[in-house]
Image: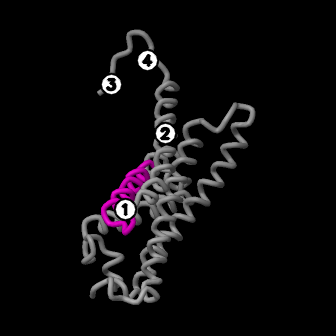
Amino acid sequence: MIMGSVDPSASLYWLSSRAAGTAALLFASASVFVGALRAGGLAGSAARGSRRRLELAIIHEALGWATIVALLIHGFVLMGDNYLPQNFADIAIPFVGPFHPVPNGIGIISGYVFMVLSLTYYLRDRFGEARWKAMHRFVLLAWVGSIVHTLGEGTDREQAWFLVVLAVPAIAALVALGMRVRGSARSEPAAPPGAQPTA
């Protein structure tokens, strides 16, 4: 099928998928940004910190759900498309689809990782707080994978406006993550004199 010969009205599903995919990446970037602010102790002074962290947790959770919903729309809406027909296997199984299989597969895997790890929030008591936090950090890999997917397959990836729209929240998230890592390094207690390093 030659895309240029298709009636634009028939590509509504394709346009909807593009919009949902862009929204999913923006929501995910915002979620990473807010999560880094909360976890990195960047929520404000000690007096207001507890309340601010609670507010950030609510926003972080809402952004996670918004990302999941946008991801589901991004994938499943394509099954009704006549512009670039895809079946369930194409959108659910990594590297199976005929359209840019590698970045598409990375995007599918990233979507699964993001959704599963986001939903483990409601099971953190079973995992234990420390173990859950360690698992939750892998959301960052899903976020990076979604960026790779977008730059490798996104229809608008060569448009300047699109790159700016994606870059601004992504850079903000990276800055917040950097501040979190820097803050964590400063807060680590120093080893007592004469202590031996562990392997």
Residue 108, which numbered label? none
Residue at 66%, 44% (x, y): give it: 53
Disc 1/disc 4 C-alpha distance (Å): 48 Å
Mark sitting on residue 191: 4
Determine whether label 1 and label 4 are within 8 Å by CB.
Answer: no
Please give left or right for residue 82 compared with residue 33 in the image. Answer: left
Q: Distance between the residues labelled 1 and 2?
A: 23 Å
Q: Are marks 3 and 1 in contact (CB under 8 Å)?
A: no
Tell me: 16 left or right of 56. Answer: left
Name the residue at 40% across, 86% down: 81
Q: Foreground mark, 1 or 4? A: 1
- The relative height of residue 79 versus residue 49 in the rendered view (above or below) is below
Q: What residue type is labelled 3?
A: Thr
Disc nearer the start of the sequence (2/4):
2
Marks 3 and 4 close (CB-CB < 8 Å): no
Task: Give the vertical position of 168 relative to 196 (above or below).
Answer: below
Q: Name the residue under label 3.
A: 198
Q: Give the range drawn in magenta.
A: 137-157
Q: What element carries label 3?
A: loop
Q: What residue type is labelled 1?
A: Arg
> Residue 178: x, y in percent?
46, 36
User: In this view, which residue lies farthest toward the top?
Assistant: 193
Task: Give residue 175's mark.
Answer: 2
Percent across and percent down for residue 88 are: 35, 83
Name the image quarter holding the C terminus.
Answer: top left
Residue hosting label 1: 157
Image coordinates of residue 94 in percent, x first then y, are 29, 70
